[in-house]
Amino acid sequence: MTELGMGSGAHRAVVEFKKIREGHVGLFATHHIANGDVAVALSGRNLQTPTRFSVQIGDGRHADKDGLVEHTNHSCTPSTFLDLSDPKAPRLRALRDIALGDEITFDYCACEEDMSTPFDCECGADRCYGTIKGYRYLTPDQRERLGDRASPWLAAKYAEQEMIPDISPSVEAAPISARAV
Ligand SMILES: [Zn+2]
C-alpha cells in the first residue's frame, strides 16, 4: 500500500494503491463503496494540455498531480465515472456497489477528448474499445451507450458538431474589418 500523499482526507479510508504486476499499479477499494457514492475526490492543479496522467475536466482543462487519479486504470466496463456536476469538485462516483478489494476504474473515453498517450485496452469486455484514444474517436453508437457517464461538456460539444454543417470556410473568409475588437 502506498501512502496517499494528496487530496482531501475523505477518500483515504476507502481506496489504496496496489501493485497489479511489475510496473503497473491500480487503485482499489478498502471498504464497501455504495452505488452512487464518491470513491475519489480529485484535487490537483489545472493544466491546459493533457499529460499521460492528467484527467480532463473541461474543454482545454485538465487536472494533474492528483496523486490518485494517475493510478486509476481505464476499463470499458468501469466501476466509477467522472462526475463533473460540480465543476469545482470533480469526483469519481461509483456506478455500482464496489466491494472491498474491487478495483476503482473509469472509462477514459467518457471524459478525455483526445488522449496524449493512446494505448491498447486489455479489459476483455464484450464491447471493449480496443485502442483507447478519447471521446472524439468514438462512434455515434459508442457515444450513445455512454449516456450520462460521458462528461456533459463533451457530449454537448460533439452533439453540436453532428447537428451543424461545417461552416468554417465562410468564417475564415470574413473580412478583417468584421472581427470583433
Ligand atoms: Zn477495454
Image (spheres, grey):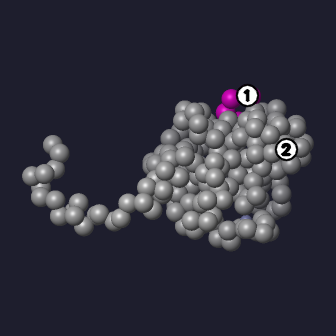
Q: Nearer the viewer, residue 66 or 170?
A: 170
User: Does the magenta segment cover residue 15?
Assistant: no
Apparent side of residue 63 relative to residue 129 in the rendered image (left or right) = left
Residue 9, numbered label: 1
- Residue 10 percent across, percent down from the top left: 74, 28
The span shown in magenta is 5-10
Q: Nearer the viewer, residue 163 or 118?
A: 163
- Mark 1, other Cα within 10 Å: few <14 / some 14–19 / many ≥20: few
Q: Is residue 123 visible?
A: yes
Q: Main secondary structure of the magenta part?
A: loop
The residue under the point 66% across, 38% down is 91
- Residue 72 percent across, percent down from the top left: 72, 50
**Ligand 1 image position (quadrant):** bottom right
In the image, residue 13 sits, relative to residue 174, either above or below, namely above
- Residue 157 percent across, percent down from the top left: 46, 53
The kind of residue tagged 1 is Gly
- Mark 2, other Cα within 10 Å: few <14 / some 14–19 / many ≥20: many
The residue under the point 43% across, 55% down is 160
Q: Nearer the viewer, residue 164 or 118?
A: 164
Residue to which mark 2 is pinned:
98
Count of numbered marks: 2
Q: Nearer the viewer, residue 163 or 137?
A: 163
Note whether ligand 1 is within 8 Å of mark 1.
no
